[in-house]
Image (cartoon, rainbow, N blue to C red):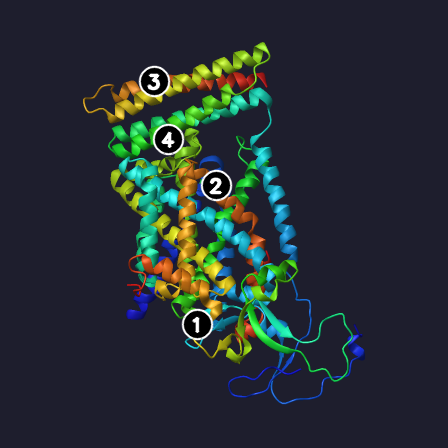
Amino acid sequence: MEVAGLPHRQVRRCVVTVRTPRVPTRGAGSLAMMLVALMVALGGCATAGGGVPGSVSRAVDQSTSAVATSRLALVLNSGARLTRAAASTTLSDMLGELESARASVLELPATVQDERMLRHQAVTAIDDAVAGAVKAQEAVASDDGSPSIDEGKAALDTAADRLADLKQRLAGSQ
Amino acid sequence: MKRLLGVALGVLTAIGGFVDIGDLVTNAIVGSRFGFSLVWVVIVGVIGICLFANMSGRVAAASGRATFEVIRERLGPRAGLANLGASFFINLMTVTAEIGGIALALQLASSVSYLLWIPVAVVAVWLVIWRVKFSIMENVTGLLGLSLIVFAVALFLLKPDWGGLAGQALAPAVPETETVPGYWYYAVALFGAAMTPYEVFFFSSGAVEEGWTVKDLSQSRNNVLVGFPLGGLLSVAIAGCAAVVLLPAGIEVTSLSQVILPVAEAGGKLALAFVLVGIVAATFGAALETTLSSGYTLAQFFGWSWGKFRRPAQAARFHLAMIICLLVGVAVLSTGVDPVLVTEYSVVFSAVALPLTYLPILVVANDPQYMGEHVNGRAVNVLAMI
Amino acid sequence: MKNPSRLQPAPPVAGRTLDAQLHLLDRQALDADGLPVTTVDDLEMNGPATGVPIPPGTAPPLLDAILTGPVLATRIFGGRPPASRLIRIPWKDVSDVGTVIRLGVRAESLGADWVERWVRDKIIARIPGGRHDPH
């Protein structure tokens, strides 16, 4: 075969061979698929299951974490180790966490009396936590010292105790 | 003396540039839930990224072409397209996560809602890509990102039980509050956070941007071999802070605000200032790198003119693609989705797509046609396969 | 199609023998100034139709042009766009074939480069600072 002339009038021969290219990455696609399936399975196993008590337990864990964070932020702020901006951002983040925990509990089905009681207790405990976090937020933001830091701490502690009780009861009944 | 400064600069920028929002969040989550029992994943991840960054740098220096260009030539358009699709999608998610990270850090500093910071962050990122020289961009964000060392300082100040931590690290076990599937899920996520795909494409394109020759190879190898492990140590420090302060309190990390609490506890407002500067710098730098990486991969696949060393008018489609990426990122964040959630997903997807994104590099780096004498050594190949 | 091993070997010639798949396809094309233009997405050849017996004495197929643009999709997934829709870089513009394909002309004069020029003129140039070198 000949190739049409190039600027310097050099005639080059062009041999067109049809060769299937090596595709060593073909295996990579199926490997990636397997990994996706694996991650979905792992993620699912890690978070799902347990029925209503399981879901309530997870919501309680979430709320306990949020309450502990709020308390830490409050303590650090009162000890002048945390700026007001950072503390109030943390507290509003935690309020968001508590709201989502509360919403997840309310979404649960409550067909049996036991489940209804469980749901009710969880919602009450989370409401306490929300009240505590709000008080902490006010304490951080207040310019005149009221509500005081101690009041905020006390409210959070009460909520934490309530949540811990509930968690123990859940663990005990399982 | 000047050479020493140059070397120091290289190493420091490697350290400062290693940590991004994915590392910050994932390491903190892991520390707060699993303590030190997943440190081995960070070590494996650092080894991996060192290997591959080195490889891609060698490809760029030996052949004068960036890795993605070579991927399409060597493996054909179909494999190249698959790789492009996966990398681009993950890049986009990572860009979104990084911009979210910048906004969250600024919110922590100012208590102005992060949603308001997002447009500011995006415009700032774009301006730097548009106008600032590559080397200046790298050096400034890298050096500022170094202030994340405050995590390591904080860990020392917290006076942890070193023996206990070492025991957890060396004899990994699933804590009783967690499940085995959860452990492995986060192991994979942590691996994906350490071995972000964009890093490699950015590294090799950066090599072309800065005009590396074979002579620069050894210096770049040193930068990588020293800088990245130190960056890995930083990641471990982040996990350590979380493990020491948050784990005993039963706090599970779900937001960026929790990540900085241990630092504040250790060092007060001064440490807090350092950590916020560090987070903004590191995520800003990472946002720049991921956005550029999206541009690089697209432009190199389709053969467009690319590069920050060219004025935008000479690399029009390259810049347009990046602008579109940034806009998509803003759009996603404006829906109010939690940036930390986006971060978690981006890290998991990175891990999942690792074979798809890294295998081509391995193939290419082994090709003598491009590499001449710089073909991978046997040992490197064996390690890289893992 | 005849079994390749039964074909007579090609007569020896002066000049380089190129393998289209290895040396031409998917290679970067740079213009006379070294500016990237595109990657070679496909090649256009004219010559006898496939599937039809070739009468002896027919001229061999000639490589007409480098193709770019939407042909990439048809190359990967199959099919072929109509000839009028092909975006061509005529082979006469090619000055060298190596690790990259160098064109002897500047990108400005190529029809294949119109997307880049359009984006540049309508979008990038309108944003302040687009025409300046980076700091």
The chain that hosts pointer 4 is: A
Q: Is B370 placed above or below B333 here?
A: below
Picture quadrant of residue A14: bottom right
The chain that hosts pointer 1 is: C
Q: How many marks?
A: 4
Secondary structure under badge 3? helix
Picture quadrant of residue B80: bottom right
- Whole-angstrom CA distance, mark 2 to mark 3, is 32 Å
Image spot of residue B371 (x, y percent):
53, 72
Tag 4 and tag 3 share a subunit: yes
Labels 3, 1: front one: 1
Labels 1, 4: front one: 1
- Whole-angstrom CA distance, mark 1 to mark 4, is 54 Å
Secondary structure under badge 1? helix
- Residue type (three-letter) at the residue carrying disc 4: Asp
| Residue C107: assigned label | 1
Q: Is A121 placed above or below B9 here?
A: above
In the foreground, B322 or A172: B322
Residue found 47% across the figure and 55% down from its top: B198
Image spot of residue B376 (x, y percent):
55, 68
- Whole-angstrom CA distance, mark 4 to mark 3, is 18 Å
Tag 3 and tag 1 share a subunit: no
Residue at the limit of the structure toward the top, as seen here: A113
Residue at the limit of the structure toward the front, as seen here: C84
Labels 2, 3: front one: 2
The chain that hosts pointer 2 is: B
- Whole-angstrom CA distance, mark 1 to mark 2, is 44 Å
Residue to which mark 2 is pinned? B344
Tag 1 and tag 2 share a subunit: no
Q: In this view, does B135 lie to the left or right of B203?
A: left
